[in-house]
Image (spheres, rainbow, N blue to C red):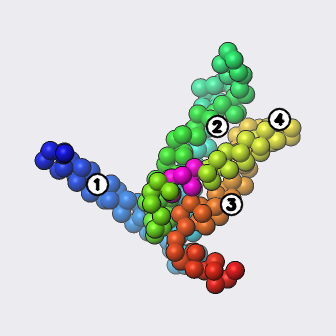
Amino acid sequence: MFSLPNKIFCCSMVQLLRNIRNKIIRLIDWFYFPVFRFIPNEVFRYAFTGGINTALDLFLYFIIYRYILDMQIVDLGFLAISAHIAAFLIVFPVTFSTGFILAKYVTFSASELRGRIQLFRYGVTVFGSIMLNYVFLKLFVEYFGWFATFSKAITTVIVVIYSYISQRYFSFKTAQVAVSRKVNG
């Protein structure tokens, strides 16, 4: 099926990705100072990778909302979308992908679920995040009259709390989590 050059390329690519993963983990763990020892390493890694992904999300959102969409309604001919919602929809595929990769390979790497199950469950939890983003952005921008970027930041805090809980106990569930839930519940 695979020719020798393809096998070598695939093996070297897998090794490259493992090296990148290990370097990211080492970088994150370097910041895991003794001050943070009261926080479980998994929570710290989630906060760190989530913080990076959130910063990327906010940065891209601001640039797209402010400069690409110029804060104007996006008229698709059959549908008009407000700029703050359109910016969210444009940024979403990027942060979905980076978020899943970081969660699967860096934060929740101990999960024993198959990758496609993790991806499906991650998609379900992210759909919940989308709904929360949509509702809170609509509420904060259109009803409260807050600035869009500030509203996005507040919404992000709410969504991050929901996201960690749902990913930890659903998307990337481990046997340890299942056992602790049986013992405690």
Dot 3 or dot 4: first in sequence order is: 4
Q: In the image, which is nearer the foreground, mark 3 or mark 1? A: 1
Residues under numbered marks 2 and 1 in contact, where contact means CB atoms less than 8 Å apart: no
Q: Identify the mark at residue 161; answer none if there is no mark.
A: 3
Q: Quick one: SS at disc 3?
A: helix
Is residue 37 depicted above or below 53 in this figure?
below
Q: Amino acid at mark 3?
A: Ile
* The image quarter in which residue 72 lies: top right
- In the image shown, does 15 or 66 lie closer to the viewer? 15
Q: Amino acid at mark 2?
A: Phe
Q: Identify the mark at residue 88; answer none if there is no mark.
A: 2
Q: Amino acid at mark 1?
A: Val
Residue at x 48% of width, y 64% of height: 113
Check disc 4 and report the residue beneath it.
142
How far apart in space, not on screen, are marks 3 and 1 (Cα)?
32 Å
- Tell me the quadrant of the picture where the C terminus can be found: bottom right
Check disc 1 and report the residue beneath it.
14
How far apart in space, not on screen, are marks 2 and 1 (Cα)?
32 Å
How far apart in space, not on screen, are marks 4 and 2 (Cα)?
15 Å
Q: How many marks?
A: 4
Is residue 181 depicted above or below 56 in this figure?
below
106 sits left or right of 153 in the view = left
* Furthest-top residue in this view: 77
How far apart in space, not on screen, are marks 3 and 2 (Cα)?
19 Å
Residue at x 24% of width, y 49% of height: 10
Q: Determine if residue 31 is in view.
A: no
Give the magenta range: 118-123
Dot 3 or dot 1: first in sequence order is: 1
Q: Quick one: SS at disc 1?
A: helix
